[in-house]
Image (cartoon, grey):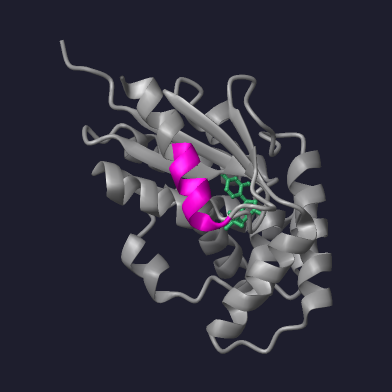
């Protein structure tokens, strides 16, 4: 009998460091990693290019929302995702908006579950990994930090990428995005009942990594 691959689900608030943590864990453990936020960012970016007003996707019966569903249900090229600049705040907002559309979530589900079934084991990070995408994951985490410390980290990251950014705008955008992601009807951002919750406000990246790794290793033993 083949053994079920070990899956690590990392959910949490925007800019809480989930992606960096997931990447490092996967590389340390020889597993594959998927930052599922990139999939929603990809759909958001494609929709932003085509529509005049991104807010129209809030009506899930609108042609704009239907277009978003079509983008999500077509095969996604990881090469294209890497080529596109998906880091900006307009794309973040668009990703959060399209992520509430049922056809978008349904369209992206199979891709995520395929990655999660990799025999090497997988680390997926997002908002609904432990609750919807991989409810049977062996290790689940919910990572957060105060919104001010997340805004500060995001501000520095974007500045380092050479972007013109204003701290107050980032803070407001993160608050709006968390509220939208947590309040949507379908697969809202929330901790799975069996998730290990970690507030990283006063922790550095190494401390977060060591803590999460120790929990993972205790579950693998
Ligand atoms: O993790 P991120 O900030 O790159 O995600 C961008 C948006 O995508 C986020 O605001 C909500 C959405 N998202 C989601 O709904 N479900 C996921 N599993 C990952 C992201």
Taking the image as shown, residue 194 lies to the left or right of residue 20, namely right
Instruction: Identify which residue, 177 or 49, lies in the foreground.
Output: 177
* Residue at position x 53%, y 71% in the image: 86
Q: Which residues are magenta?
A: 204-212
* Quadrant of the snapshot with the N terminus: top left
Residue 95's quadrant in the figure? bottom right
Is the residue 198 above or below the residue 18 in the image?
above
Taking the image as shown, residue 94 lies to the left or right of residue 58, namely left
Residue 120's quadrant in the figure? top left
The outermost residue toward the top is 1
* Residue at position x 29%, y 47% in the image: 28
Residue 90 percent coordinates (x, y): 69, 73
Q: Count all numbered tags in the image, as a single digit.
A: 0
Is the residue 128 above or below the residue 14 in the image?
above
* Quadrant of the snapshot with the C terminus: top left
Would residue 65 be visible to someone looking at this image?
Answer: no
Magenta stretch: dominant secondary structure: helix
Residue 81 percent coordinates (x, y): 41, 66
Residue 200 percent coordinates (x, y): 64, 49
Residue 143 percent coordinates (x, y): 62, 43
* Residue at position x 71%, y 84% in the image: 165
């Amino acid at each position: 009998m083949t053994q079920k691959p070990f899956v690590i689900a990392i959910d949490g608030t925007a800019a809480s460091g989930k992606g960096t943590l997931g990447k490092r864990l996967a590389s340390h453990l020889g597993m594959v990693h998927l930052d599922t936020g990139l999939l929603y960012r990809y759909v958001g970016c494609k929709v932003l290019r085509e529509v005049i007003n991104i807010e129209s996707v809030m009506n899930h019966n609108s042609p704009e929302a239907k277009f978003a569903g079509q983008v999500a249900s077509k095969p996604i090229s990881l090469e294209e995702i890497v080529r596109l600049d998906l880091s900006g705040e307009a794309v973040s907002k668009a990703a959060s908006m399209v992520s509430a559309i049922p056809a978008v979530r349904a369209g992206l589900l199979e891709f995520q579950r395929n990655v999660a079934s990799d025999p090497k084991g997988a680390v997926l990070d997002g908002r609904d990994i432990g609750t919807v995408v991989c409810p049977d994951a062996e290790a689940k985490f919910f990572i957060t930090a105060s919104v001010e410390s997340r805004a500060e980290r995001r501000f520095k990251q974007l500045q380092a990428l050479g972007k013109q950014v204003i701290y107050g705008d980032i803070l407001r955008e993160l608050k709006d995005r968390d509220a939208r992601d947590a309040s949507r009807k379908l697969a809202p951002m929330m901790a799975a009942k069996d998730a290990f919750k970690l507030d990283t406000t006063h922790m550095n990246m190494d401390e977060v990594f060591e803590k999460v790794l120790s929990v993972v290793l205790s579950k693998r033993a």
